[in-house]
Amino acid sequence: MKKYDIVLYGATGFTGKQAARYLAQAADAGEISFAIAGRRREALSLLRDGLPTRDVGIIVADSNKPDEVEAMVSQAKVIANCAGPFAKYGTPVVQACVEKRVDYVDITGETPWVRSLIDSFHDQAEASGTRIIPFCGFDSVPSDLGAWLVVRHFRDQLNQGTRFVKGYFRMGGGGFNGGTFASFINMAEQGHGRAMANRILLNPDPQSPAWADEPPDQQAVIYDAQVGGWTAPFMMASINTRVVRRSAALAASCYQNPYGDSFKYEETLNFGSGLRRRAKATAYTAGLAGVALSLRSTAGQGLLKRLGPSPGEGPSEEAMDGGFVRCDLHGQGERGDKLHYRIEAQGDAGNRFTVATLCESALALVLNRDALPGGPERGGLLTPALGLGDVLVERLRKLDGFVLQQLED
């Protein structure tokens, strides 16, 4: 018998504190038993003192101490991990979850790290029915769930495969917190640029010629007639597109439910129409190119570290609450039918949206496990779409400020 339904690891970081408050509300309502975990008992005790319920456990665990990680995981049904950079701190936690058959979710966007998890743990987790589901934050829930909703509509309602889906993002407010920024810098320091350039990095076979014609990530400002506006490279596209492609590849190769014979996915940042919007898109693209160039050198990385937020820092409550996320997904079926799906939410992408999707993912694994895609026996290194699917969709639809709906194209 597990002591806790959910253990939140990395609870004292900027995102972790928000997730602790979110999950404490569910605990206070009697839905779950819950514990917060991290390296320092004093910080955990201080966090618990500020939560809406005192019925919260405390677990001290350092990811560099296997016995502490094992003890933490052994007490949980689900581990929700906010402790990044995940390539530095996450692997022992995932390994313990696989060995102890404990489900796992996190908010990573570190695709090379997840590739290493796939290689090391997918087969064992699949055999035991353990769900290891990274990318349960803004990276990559709207992209992955949105593409899956479009594909499912074409398949179930129109009896056809999907030719392509393209995601158009708009967002505002908030900004990077220190943990996200640290993960971003760590990937650059580890030289992961070449791995991230692989368009099928997360596919079961990342060298398969069957997926060799995947579209490249957008690199320039482009006028897109589909939305009647100027679009620019989206800095999360190199993460999200790989996740969606893993979903499509697993659906075809493992679950005999392919997205389409030649399914393609890509995404972009939509700035809107007009000359001023074009100028903003151009300035943003130039800034993004400058950051990419800085990340290639040790000096540039050092400069970005000095300019960016430190671990534990992040946007103000006002900035996070005043943000928004909108993802418009336009798809075309194999017979030419078109579909427009929208996912939007109040609150900024990197904090409010991410915390909600992480916590609802963890709650889905605890409270709705029998209803998850593939039934209770499905396991492996899964994506939000294939690991959580409709259960997460319906949980998000019930939240204030969240909208997931089909629109007229």
Image (cartoon, rainbow, N blue to C red):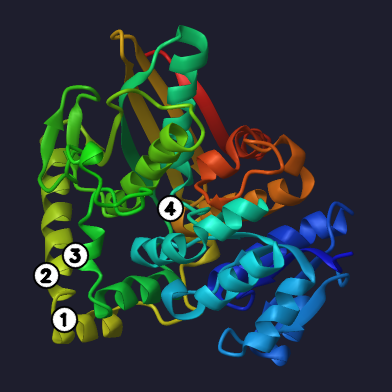
- Where is mark 4, residue-wise? 139
- Where is mark 1, residue-wise? 300
Which picture quadrant has residue 335?
Answer: top left
Q: In this view, does 49 lie above or below 227?
A: below
> CA gap, disc 4 to disc 3?
20 Å
N-terminal-most mark, 3 or 1: 3
Judged left or right of residue 232, residue 21 is right
Mark in front: 3 vs 1: 3
Residue 49 visible at all: no
In percent of the image, x 86 and y 69: which residue is there? Answer: 3
State if disc 2 and disc 3 touch (CB < 8 Å). no
> CA gap, disc 3 to disc 1?
18 Å
Mark seen at residue 194: 3
N-terminal-most mark, 1 or 4: 4
Judged left or right of residue 206, residue 183 is right
- Where is mark 2, residue-wise? 293
Judged left or right of residue 175, residue 255 is right
N-terminal-most mark, 4 or 3: 4
Callout 1 crowding tier (Cα within 10 Å): few <14, some 14–19, many ≥20: some
Mark seen at residue 130: none
N-terminal-most mark, 2 or 1: 2
Which picture quadrant has residue 189?
Answer: bottom left
N-terminal-most mark, 3 or 2: 3
- Name the secondary structure under disc 4: loop
